[in-house]
Amino acid sequence: MLESTMPKIYDLIIVGGGLVGAGLAVALHGTGLTIALIDARKPSSDDPRLFALNKSSCQFLENLGLWDALAKYAAAIKDVHVSHKGHFGAVRLRGHDVAAVALGHVIPAYKIETALNDRLLALPDVTLYRPATLTTLTEANGMVTLTIASDEKNIRLQSAIVMGADGTASIVRDQAAIAAETFDYQQSAVVTRTRLHRSHLHIAYERFNKTGAIAMLPLVNNDYHECATIWTADNAKASELMAMSDAAFLEALQNEFGYRLGRLQAISTRHFFPLRMLCAEKAVNQGVLLLGNALHTLHPIAAQGFNLALYEVALLAEGIKERCAKKELFSITDLQNMIARSEKQQTVSMSVSHRLPQLFRGTSMLTSLLTQAGMTAFDMAQPLKKIFINRMMGRTGTVPRLLLGANE
């Protein structure tokens, strides 16, 4: 394998060309920075994930100029309905509780990736290495040197700052010797699309049961009514669900979820995702900063993972743009201080994502009664609901301008 000798030098290197890394690269357009973006895979349309983006994340994509390309694929979430099978009490969160037309939107992940990729290809200040895999990362004299494997040759890149946005199994995190704590929920998610007999009315449902929860999220489909289905369950149950015929799975789904969406008609291909929480012990080591799932991977039950990542990207982009506009240099320490401003939102998002799966799995009568009473009381406490909704929408602590509309 051939290897370049002199490293190519950039102001910033981003490892990971997924939604977080690409989002940061697009957000930094116009700063004058030279950016290298390393992506291990080419864009594809086979990503089955469906993201429930809160209002702030949707505004972020709009502020990047991407919303026109995404709007026709974005299903509005006007209300959220949370319930617990076999128990009384429910929580209803409504957009009008916070004077919002919608609390967020559900968009297929690959549609966001396509819009970001189209924009990336038009940016002259971003050099895209794809497909390319990071093989080594070293730091010396204030510079980080990367070796990447691309097109049967090794390429050396160098920068004072490297962003690791390469996911839960982050090579950057490993190469930078940043330890991470993991928590295995002993659960997996089964993801599919469910055809409905009637409209979902833009309501997102979260229904807890003994082994996990079922989320039914509104989708856009011009041919028939459809929801995204994310069924989280303990590993044994999830494996059983994957082994069922489509008809048996649909019957099980109907029995567990109920008839709030009427008689369920059909499902599409099912996909299986093991669930665990990961939290890196620190965001920065020498010239490396972690972002997104490389920094913290969350349980999907509260749909906070990608929303939190975009919140952090917006904070970084805003801080870097301010420095560049003033023609000021910035260091990895400056970026660490920028990302530290997300601490309040991190605490909220990570706490909710971690505690919810365990809260509803209590088996004692006392636990069940307390949970039911708490849901009923919370649903009646309008001021508390408003605070909670704002926190879930990324409005805790510092709110970056990239997450706000023109009139906010």
Image (cartoon, rainbow, N blue to C red):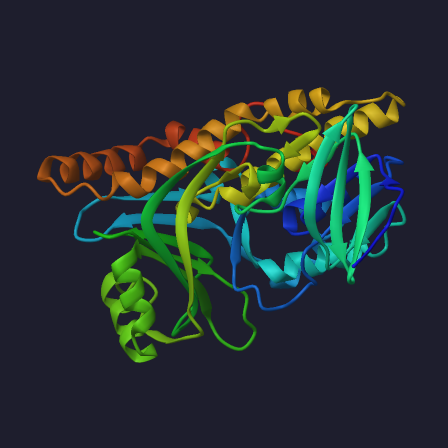
Closer to the camera, 327 or 265?
327
Task: Report which quarter residue 194 is drawn in.
Answer: bottom left
Q: Is residue 82 left or right of residue 30?
A: left
Q: Left or right of 88: which side holds 79?
A: right
Q: Position of residue 265 (x, y in %)?
A: 36, 77
State the residue lying farthest toward the left: 365
Nearest to the observer: residue 406 or residue 331: 331
Above or below residue 378? Residue 80 is: below
**Residue 338 rendering spot, x and y as whole percentages:** 67, 24
Q: Residue at coordinates 59% horizontally, 58% vertically from top-left?
A: 109
Q: Residue drawn at (72%, 54%), measured in percent from left and top?
A: 116
> Eyeballing the image, is 336 above or below 43?
above
Left or right: 317 in relation to 395: right
Compared with 243, 306 (above or below) is above
- Looking at the rendering, which quadrant does residue 283 occupy? top right
The residue under the point 54% across, 43% down is: 293
Q: Quadrant of the N terminus?
A: bottom right
Q: Quadrant of the C terminus?
A: top right
- Residue at 64%, 61% in the rendered image: 111
Look at the image and tell me whether residue 265 can be seen.
yes
Residue 29 seen in this snapshot:
no
- Residue 383's spot in the image, x, y percent? 40, 27
Extreme residue in the front direction: 1
Where 205 sits versus 388, above or below?
Answer: below
Residue 173 locus on image (x, y percent): 59, 38
